[in-house]
Image: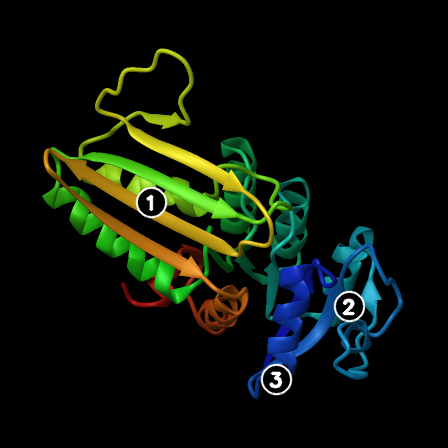
């Protein structure tokens, strides 16, 4: 049985991940971390019945990991919190699944240093949906074959999303750039802005959109549009549990969902 801890236990993703864990046969919830509903049973907080795991304050993460000794910590919180969460997990030699986005290069470097120093494994991905990670492969192939086509990326998310553009959009741009020998990224356009050999990235925020990503390859007289839509956050939660099962048996290091899925 895999012992799991979840940060952001009352958030949209955290509560859904806990619900998935409670419904699984091979993963057990041993710790739930948040700054809301502290002391309340984690199962009762998501209306799933009592599970005997009280919600612990985020400030107590280090001691809670030391006490409960999980095999993996699943983190879908915010960039401001993720570095400290990763450092606490690494200190306690706990494997990691990180779906938080919007962190800086400096924050990533801090996380990488902590993880590599722990001798444990982590799966870090901007998107845990299985379909999105296959989408990257299709985008990569199209980007290589359509080198003379202009590439534009349009992403749409709900009005509560904090970072823009999405990590998934930036990853898609990086995939295209890599097969084209490197390209500049332009984030939206305003005023006099003649198009060069860049990759355009555009963010839309509104309503309750879970996550749409469109990659447009436009040539003379024709275009190809590749699109992925997430209809429910369950796509991300299911992928996170799949990553948790992978990471507890992985060699020390940092992995992506392409490793989890064998892509």
Residue found at x 19% / y 37%:
218
First-in-chain label (1 vs 2):
2
Image quarter (top left, top right, bottom left or bottom right) of the C terminus = bottom left
156 to the left or right of 186: right
Q: State the mark number for residue 23.
A: 3
What's the distance in space between the residues labelled 1 and 2, CA to CA?
Answer: 40 Å
Identify the residue at the far top of this view. 192
The residue at which mark 2 appears reads as 67
Closer-to-camera residue (25/253): 25
Of labels 3 and 2, the one closer to you:
3
Mark 3 or mark 2, which has the lower sequence index?
3
Across and down, in percent, residue 231 comes to 48, 64
Separation of residues labelled 3 and 2 (CA atoms): 24 Å
Location of the N terminus (image quadrant): bottom right
Binning the other alpha carbons within 10 Å of mark 2 as few (below 14), some (14 to 19) or many (20 upward) gives few
Q: Cβ–Cβ below 8 Å for labels 1 and 2?
A: no
Q: Which residue is more in the foreground, 225 or 58?
A: 225
Mark 3 crowd level (few <14, some 14–19, many ≥20, 10 Å Cα): few
Rendered position, 220 above or below 252: above
Question: Nearer the viewer's eye, disc 1 or disc 2?
Answer: 1
The residue at the point 19 percent across, 43 percent down is 143
Q: Is residue 182 above or below residue 233?
A: above
Residue at the image position 50 percent from the left and 70 percent from the top: 248
In the image, residue 252 sits, relative to residue 5, either above or below, namely above
Closer-to-camera residue (200/242): 200
Left or right: residue 155 compared with residue 48: left
- State the SS at label 2: helix
Q: Determine whether the residue tagged by mark 3 lies in a helix, strand or loop.
A: loop
Q: Residues within 10 Å of mark 1 (few under 14, many from 20)?
A: many
State the mark number for residue 172: 1
């Amino acid at each position: 049985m895999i012992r799991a801890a979840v940060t952001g236990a009352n958030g949209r993703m955290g509560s859904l991940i806990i619900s998935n864990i409670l419904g699984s046969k091979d993963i057990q919830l041993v710790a739930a971390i948040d700054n809301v509903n502290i002391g309340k049973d984690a199962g009762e907080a998501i209306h799933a019945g009592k599970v005997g795991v009280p919600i612990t304050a985020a400030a107590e993460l280090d001691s809670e990991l030391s006490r409960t000794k999980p095999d993996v910590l699943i983190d879908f919180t915010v960039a401001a919190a993720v570095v400290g969460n990763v450092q606490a997990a690494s200190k306690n030699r706990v494997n990691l699944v990180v779906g938080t986005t919007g962190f800086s290069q400096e924050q990533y470097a801090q996380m990488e240093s902590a993880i590599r120093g722990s001798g444990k494994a982590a799966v870090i991905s901007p998107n845990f949906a299985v379909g999105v990670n296959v989408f990257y492969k299709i985008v990569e192939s199209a980007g290589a074959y359509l080198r003379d086509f202009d590439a534009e990326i349009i992403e749409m998310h709900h009005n509560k999303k904090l970072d823009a553009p999405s990590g998934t959009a930036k990853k898609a741009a990086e995939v295209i750039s890599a097969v084209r020998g490197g390209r500049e990224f332009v984030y939206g356009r305003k005023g006099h802005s003649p198009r060069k050999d860049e990759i355009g990235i555009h963010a839309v925020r509104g309503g309750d959109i879970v996550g749409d990503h469109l990659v447009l390859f436009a040539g003379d007289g024709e275009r190809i549009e590749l699109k992925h839509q997430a209809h429910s956050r369950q796509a991300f939660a299911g992928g996170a549990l799949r990553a948790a099962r992978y990471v507890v048996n992985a060699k020390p290091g940092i992995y992506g969902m392409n490793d989890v899925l064998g892509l």
